[in-house]
Image (cartoon, rainbow, N blue to C red):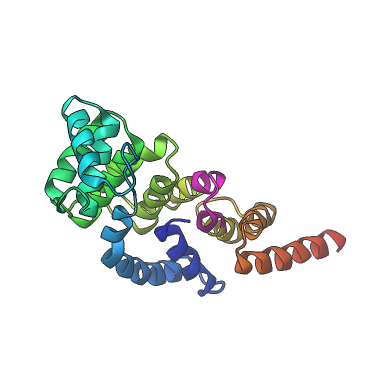
Amino acid sequence: MTAASSALAVALRHVGSHGAIAVQGVVVRVLLLLSFCSTLAIAAYPAEPAHRPGDYPEAARQYQAGAQAGDADAQYNIAMLLLNGEANSADDATAAYWLRFAAESGSAPAQFALGRLCETGRGLSRSQTEATRWFTQAAKQGHTEAQVNLATQYFLGRGAPQDMRRAARWYERAAEGGDVGAQYIVATLYERGDGVPRSLAQAWHWYRAAALQGDPAAAIRARDLGQLIVDRAQE
């Protein structure tokens, strides 16, 4: 579950049956809190091991050589080491430099990471529009976390026009990819008819999917909604 989908799912659990506007007010406050820890979220992406565990100087040497030779994976990995402070010292600007090369070469993880840097202004100028652009490129390649972040941009109208239909579409793509927070969000959208045609059957499907991954709130909603569907069918 990504930080964004987890936060939004939590918000949706606490706003009851109010409309999307009420939901957005809660979500904005939650995501403002998330912005303070977003740099930690970026740093959570480790470089791929091409060295002995903990031998970061050797990893940095190998990745630097590969990055300069134009290898997108090496460019991504040296950027992660730089962001994590594992290449002698942290260097956000150089990390952003290498991420841009990798992102422009089509690396979905690099596109997502670069989007996060644009979102927070870490190592480069802050731009929600650029964040949305990079999230879009990664999302189209099936990067689940990028799909969640892109959906949230559309949900809030941040770096893109507010568009509940596009938000719902990308949350559903992330839900199909197994993100439990996105599954809960999509279930809520179907239950309310926000950005998608109202469908209690689809809502139950996604609540059940999240419940099977251990979400207790989703299990309760799946149980209650399932009973409602049965009761209506028997009327």
Rendered view: 127 above or below 72: below
Residue 160: horizontal and vertical position, in percent? Answer: 30, 49
In depth, the one of 139 and 194 nearer the eye is: 139
Residue 163: horizontal and vertical position, in percent? Answer: 40, 51
In depth, the one of 188 and 183 nearer the eye is: 183
Q: Is residue 176 left or right of residue 115?
A: right
Residue 41: horizontal and vertical position, in percent? Answer: 33, 57
Q: Is residue 64 visible?
A: yes
* Residue reaching furthest to the right: 234
Q: Is residue 101 left or right of residue 195?
A: left
Q: Is residue 193 left or right of residue 126?
A: right
- Classified by dominant secondary structure, the portion drawn in magenta counts as helix
Q: Is residue 124 visible?
A: no
Q: Is residue 56 left or right of residue 172?
A: left
The quadrant in which the C terminus is found is: bottom right
Residue 26: horizontal and vertical position, in percent? Answer: 41, 72
Q: How many marks?
A: 0
In depth, the one of 14 and 74 nearer the eye is: 74
Quadrant assignment, res 97 = top left
Q: Residue at x 65, y 60 (%)?
A: 211
Q: Residue at x 54, y 56 (%)?
A: 180
Q: Residue at x 22, y 57 (%)?
A: 120
What span is colored magenta in the figure?
172-183
Q: Residue at x 34, y 40 (%)?
A: 48
Q: Is residue 107 magenta?
A: no
Quadrant assignment, res 183 = bottom right
